[in-house]
Image (spheres, grey):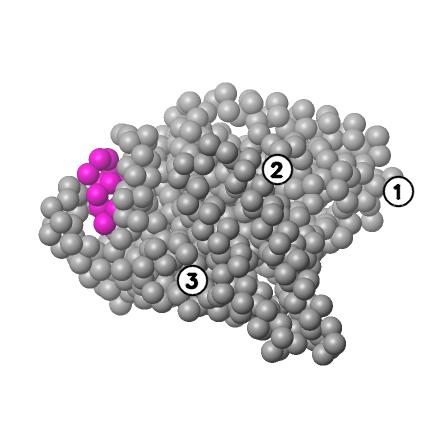
């Protein structure tokens, strides 16, 4: 039961990113808006349906013409694209075929349009030609514009929002989230989403409070409702009473004071009370986040998730485009090291322009290295860019989702092909860079001893390791309760990986979100981890924890913890044992 007065509504979800914000709600994509339903059009009404489609095209075209006009002389390079779009509104492939489909299948215009634009995409997807791929993108964009007029929906782009608001959405993809403009968006809440989904990871790196997995936020919240988002506790309060508002304003002030206090000490060394140095590195999704990594005194970039560039462009970037980004990153971080992870597309980072096949079980599908090995030319392009950037600074290459020895052998063959191409092209590059793999699939843990013989380092990806060992979809709020970093099974997997890395004398990192939560630090340090990579915002808090921790005692306690059999026993033990040094949790009303 809610302890707040009636009139206000409280919804509980999952903490996506900590912190508190208070502001007005701004709904994007209310549940159902994007679902295009098929319905039958009776004979007499087919011509009316065709007219409805034609009208939508006229409106979209007029709107587009106004855009061209308003840009006036400023167009330069955009002119071509906009004029191409203008011509496409009446293109036979899109316009003609949609009308044919409405008539032949006797279906509604939205359904027909979507069917035609999907077919166009599929038809061209196998053709490796940049020009044609760009044309397909144009057709899809034009089709989206017409669709907006058919469905009556507003064509909202998150990047275009220009008020200081809190976004309320049914779901946000990691790519949508990465469009958030920090100076405009205070926070966001979603119906869907689970713990440590990529959407929550992006929210954490943006340092904006978010609550996910609320179930019915879009159904309960209206535009301009006042919202309190408590990202730390995972709740939102809709139209709070004055008292509640007052309490939360105080809470917000305490949270900000706490954060400022922690950040003040962030320049101090990351070392335990008994002198063990723990390297704290940053995970980033965009090169722009380097600023935050440096502000938080990261010892390097422990994980650069490279897929966002692909998601934002809606196409495969060229080798030179990738090189430019990677070089920029390495130069900005110099002399600190940067670990570039090769493309981890699919799973929850699906993009039809990159891979149009929709899978029933994307987390278990053609994701990450599996996709790259199937699309060797694209993989080679990325590897070449990484090796070329490595001529400008310290880079490590990290391969995601390796699940067996054969895969890493195949990856090495592809790397060799990339090297040969670079030599033939006479390009400047560095082939002697450390190669590592993510340990994030249980089979890789079991085979860690063998895998270690093929690589220079391991990086434990607990986000997926938890997902795959507990058999839960990390985006699914209904099984979020089983997403447990401190589950004994997960801890055993970490211990096995530490042992394999040690036995084979290779470096070991952890770059899953588990490494950024203070409550996990004693057991990780106790198990022997000394390189932890996390969202930059977590670095100062984790550092404070490390600076109060005795590594020798943590090791003894880790032995006790490994003897416990439930997550509850483990959590209770840690909370009791480390109650004096665990960071502040604000329980005050
Ligand atoms: C992980 O799985 O822990 C990880 C760091 O990779 P990602 O979150 O990008 O899947
Ligand atoms: Mg992963």
Decide if residue 214 is in sight here: yes
Residue picked out by circle 3: 355
Distance, label 1 to label 3, CA atoms, is: 48 Å
User: Secondary structure beneath disc 1?
Assistant: loop
Measured from the top left, where is residue 455 in percent x and y? 24, 54
Residue picked out by circle 1: 6
Q: Residue furthest right?
A: 6
Residue picked out by circle 2: 161
Identify which residue is drawn at 53% across, 56% down: 89
Nearest to viewer (mark 1 / mark 3): 3
Q: Categorize mark 1 by other alpha carbons within 10 Å: few (<14), some (14-19), many (20+).
A: few
Measured from the top left, where is residue 510 in percent x and y? 39, 47
Report if the CB atoms under discs 2 and 1 are less than 8 Å apart: no
Which numbered disc flags the more N-terminal residue, 1 or 3? 1
Q: Quadrant of the C terminus?
A: top right
Answer with left or right where residue 127 lies relative to residue 97.
left
Distance, label 2 to label 1, CA atoms, is: 32 Å
Quarter of image, res 273 = top left
Identify which residue is drawn at 71% across, 33% down: 23
Quarter of image, res 185 = top right
Q: Categorize mark 3 by other alpha carbons within 10 Å: few (<14), some (14-19), many (20+).
A: some
- 214 vs 285: above or below: below
Nearest to viewer (mark 2 / mark 1): 2
- Closer to us: 56 or 584: 56
- Closer to us: 58 or 200: 58
Magenta residues span: 384-397
- Closer to us: 32 or 538: 32
User: Secondary structure beneath disc 3?
Assistant: loop
Q: Is 394 colored magenta in this rendering?
A: yes
- Closer to us: 106 or 121: 106
Answer with left or right where residue 272 lies relative to residue 499.
right
- 566 vs 337: above or below: below
């Amino acid at each position: 039961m809610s302890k707040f007065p009636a009139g206000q509504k409280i919804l509980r979800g999952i903490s996506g990113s900590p912190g508190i914000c208070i502001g007005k709600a701004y709904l994007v994509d209310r549940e159902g808006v994007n679902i295009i339903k098929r319905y039958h059009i009776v004979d007499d009404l087919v011509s009316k349906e065709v007219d409805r489609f034609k009208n939508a095209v006229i409106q979209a075209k007029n709107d587009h013409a106004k855009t061209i006009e308003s840009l006036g002389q400023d167009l330069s390079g955009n002119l071509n694209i906009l004029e191409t779009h203008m011509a496409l509104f009446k293109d036979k492939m899109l316009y003609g075929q949609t009308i044919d489909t409405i008539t032949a299948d006797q279906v509604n215009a939205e359904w027909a349009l979507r069917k035609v634009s999907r077919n166009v995409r599929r038809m061209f997807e196998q053709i490796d030609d940049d020009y044609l791929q760009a044309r397909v993108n144009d057709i899809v964009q034009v089709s989206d514009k017409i669709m907006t007029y058919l469905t009556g929906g507003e064509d909202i782009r998150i990047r275009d929002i220009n008020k200081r608001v809190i976004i309320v959405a049914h779901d946000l993809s990691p790519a949508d989230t990465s469009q958030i403009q920090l100076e405009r968006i205070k926070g966001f809440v979603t119906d869907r989403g689970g713990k440590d989904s990529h959407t929550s990871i992006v929210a954490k790196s943006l340092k904006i409070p978010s609550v996910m997995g609320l179930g019915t936020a879009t159904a309960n919240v209206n535009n301009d409702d006042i919202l309190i988002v408590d990202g730390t506790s995972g709740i939102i309060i809709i139209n709070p009473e004055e008292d509640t508002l007052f309490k939360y304003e105080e809470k917000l002030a305490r949270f900000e004071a706490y954060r400022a206090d922690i950040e003040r000490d962030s320049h101090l060394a990351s070392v335990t009370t008994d002198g063990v140095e723990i390297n704290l590195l940053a995970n980033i999704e965009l090169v722009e986040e380097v600023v935050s990594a440096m502000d938080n005194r990261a010892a390097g970039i422990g994980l650069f998730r490279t897929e966002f560039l692909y998601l934002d462009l809606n196409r495969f970037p060229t080798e030179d485009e990738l090189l430019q980004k990677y070089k920029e990153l390495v130069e900005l971080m110099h002399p600190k090291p940067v670990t570039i992870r090769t493309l981890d597309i699919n799973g929850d980072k699906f993009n039809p322009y990159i891979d149009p096949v929709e899978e029933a079980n994307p987390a278990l599908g053609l994701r990450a290295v599996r996709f790259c090995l199937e699309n060797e030319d694209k993989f080679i392009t990325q590897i070449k860019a990484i090796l070329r950037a490595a001529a400008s600074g310290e880079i490590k290459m990290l391969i995601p989702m390796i699940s067996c020895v054969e895969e890493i052998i195949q990856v090495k063959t592809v790397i060799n092909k990339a090297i040969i191409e670079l030599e033939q092209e006479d390009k400047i590059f560095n082939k002697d860079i450390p190669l590592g793999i993510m340990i994030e699939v249980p089979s890789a843990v079991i085979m860690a001893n063998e895998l270690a013989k093929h690589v220079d380092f391991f990086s434990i990806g607990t986000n997926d390791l938890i997902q795959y060992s507990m058999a839960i979809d990390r985006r699914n709020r209904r099984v979020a309760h089983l997403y447990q970093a401190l589950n004994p099974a997960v801890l055993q997997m970490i211990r096995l990986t530490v042992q394999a890395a040690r036995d084979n004398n290779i470096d070991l990192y952890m770059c899953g979100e588990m490494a950024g939560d203070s409550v996990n630090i004693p057991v990780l340090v106790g198990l022997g981890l000394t390189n932890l990579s996390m969202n930059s915002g977590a670095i100062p808090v984790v550092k404070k924890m490390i600076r109060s921790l005795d590594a020798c005692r943590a090791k003894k306690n880790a032995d006790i913890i490994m003897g416990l059999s439930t997550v509850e026993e483990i959590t209770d033990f840690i909370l009791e044992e480390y109650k004096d040094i665990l960071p502040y949790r604000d329980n005050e009303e």
